[in-house]
Amino acid sequence: MSRKGKGRQYKWILVAALFIIYFSSVLINQQVHLNQVERDQIAADSRLELAKRENAELLKERDLLNDINYVEKIAREELGMVKAGEIPYSLVRKDR
């Protein structure tokens, strides 16, 4: 082969190598980005599941607040309220 033919061959090999390097770097960057998106999706799914459970608990609490007996129980236990004419008392433990 002449020098001119070898020079062209090296140029094509160099161009092909540059294309391979460029597209390889693009593919690697895309894979890194897709992995990050997947991790973000998993985290978002986890937060969504937690929010759904919290929402279900709040809906249950809302439904319980429509029951007068539950409201009375909460008023007595958490707020220390009593009905008119009742005498409140509390037990003291003597464990110590």
Image (spheres, rainbow, N blue to C red):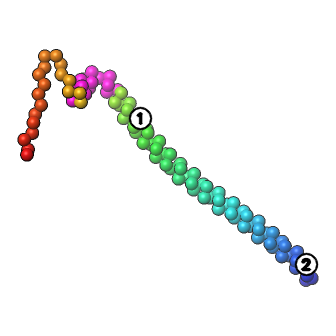
Which residue bears the numbered disc 1? Answer: 55
Tag of residue 91: none
Query: Residue 72 at what x, y percent from top left?
Result: 24, 23
Quadrant for residue 81, please give it.
top left
Q: Is residue 94 visible?
A: yes
Query: Residue 30 at what x, y percent from top left?
Result: 65, 57
Give the residue furthest to the front.
Answer: 96
Which residue bears the numbered disc 2? Answer: 5
Classify residue 84 as left or right of residue 65.
left
Relative height, residue 51 to residue 71 (above, below): below
Q: Nearer the viewer, residue 85 or 70?
A: 85
For the point 65% across and 62% down, which residue is it? 28
Query: Residue 9 at what x, y percent from top left?
Result: 86, 76
Give the alpha-carbon distance from disc 1 to disc 2, as whole Å: 74 Å
Q: Look at the image and say whether residue 52 sits in the magenta stretch.
A: no
For the point 39% across and 37% down, which residue is it? 54
Of helix, strand and loop, which one carries label 2?
helix
Question: Which is nearer the N-term, disc 1 or disc 2?
Answer: 2
Give the residue furthest to the top.
Answer: 84
Query: Residue 27 at what x, y percent from top left?
Result: 67, 60
Q: Look at the image and say whether residue 64 sits in the magenta stretch.
A: yes
Residues in magenta? Answer: 63-77
Q: Amino acid at mark 2?
A: Gly
- Is the Cβ of the residue at disc 1 closer than 8 Å to that at disc 2? no
Classify residue 75 as left or right of residue 8.
left
